Image: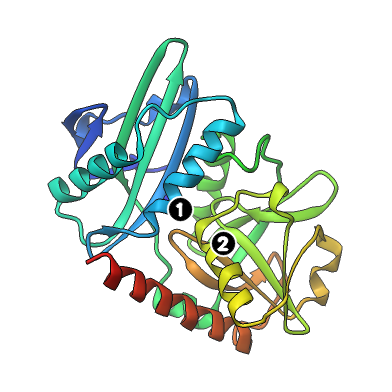
Amino acid sequence: MEGNSKMKECSQYKFLHNNKLKRTETFRDEYFRIGLSLYEVIRVVDSKPIFLDKHLSRLESSAKRIGQLVWLNYMELVRKIELVISKNGVVEGNIKIVFNIHDNNRNFYCYFVNHKYPKKQDYLNGVSTTMYNAERRNPNAKVYNHKLRTYTNSVIDNPDIFEVVLMDNLGNVTEGSRSNLFFIKDNKLYTAPDNDVLNGIVRGKVIEICERLDIPVVKEKISYKTLKHFDAAFLTGTSPQILSIRYINTLSFDVNHHLLKLLLEAYRVELLEYLIKTV
């Protein structure tokens, strides 16, 4: 999660605006309500941005899909992200990069966001979610949607609701407001087709792990009416990583399914190996 509607999105002490470090108290959430904003949110662990290459590759892909150019190259972005991590002395958190385009104005921002990580009991007991009828205009591009974000933030402010699950106009369940969604039935994983959702970094890692472990992954449209037939459900994302769902509205799911535990352990091993390799 990248914050909520009651507090300023930017956290810590300094944020980067183009090439200048500025005090966090001068940041304004309104920056991204004008024009187009492409963005990525990256998990920082042990002061290292996790799976950074995949995030920056997705950023480039998002830009191409909407006919825009990212005007900083890979190494420039890496240096800016490392600078913001260093200047804020952050060991663990979520860092956000934004390319805002408005008429002939181009602005780059890099800053830490207020986040909400699942608690230990959330991983043990699963979380509650609620449905919302909404379609992203271009689901494969990570573009700021102020109206959708404002609504989902207001729902997630409720301590009993962890995430908002989106349903399209045909009644198909697609993804979370800031996460991807998987279901389990007959020891197979089910998720929406790639073209219907944002292809999350952790989502991709889960699919890679499944391929390695010979766990079938079925990518197909999932009708809300069929949810009662699934054994388990879980979210994937920057903040939750892999998190079991106990409820979608009043529908309940098994939070102790053996595949869930297997995937979570495999993901944690992969994360640890990544941290070791990037020393």
In the image, taking residue 277 as reference, residue 207 lies left or right, namely right
Taking the spot 50% from the left edge, 79% from the top edge, the residue there is 264
Choose between 40 and 239: the one closer to the eye.
40
Residue tagged by mark 2? Answer: 204
Q: Residue 140 carries which label?
A: none
Q: Position of residue 44 (x, y in %)?
A: 30, 58
Q: Residue at x 21, y 50 (%)?
A: 85
> Does the image show residue 4?
no
Q: Distance between the residues labelled 1 and 2?
A: 10 Å
* Residue 216 position within the rendered picture, expressed as x and y whole percent measured from the top left: 72, 76
Residue shown at 26%/62% (left/top)? 92
**Image location of residue 215, percent across then percent down:** 67, 80
* Circle 2: residue type: Gly
Count of marks overlaid on the render: 2
- Residue 14 location, quadrant: top left
Q: Which quadrant is the C terminus positioned in?
A: bottom left
Q: Earlier in the sequence, mark 1 or mark 2?
A: 1
Query: Left or right: 57 with respect to 12?
Result: right
Classify the position of the N terminus by image quarter: bottom left
* Kind of residue at disc 1: Lys
Q: Do the residues labelled 1 and 2 touch (CB within 8 Å)?
A: yes
Query: In front: 273, or 163?
Result: 273
Q: Residue at x 17, y 31 (%)?
A: 22
Which numbered tag is attached to residue 54? 1
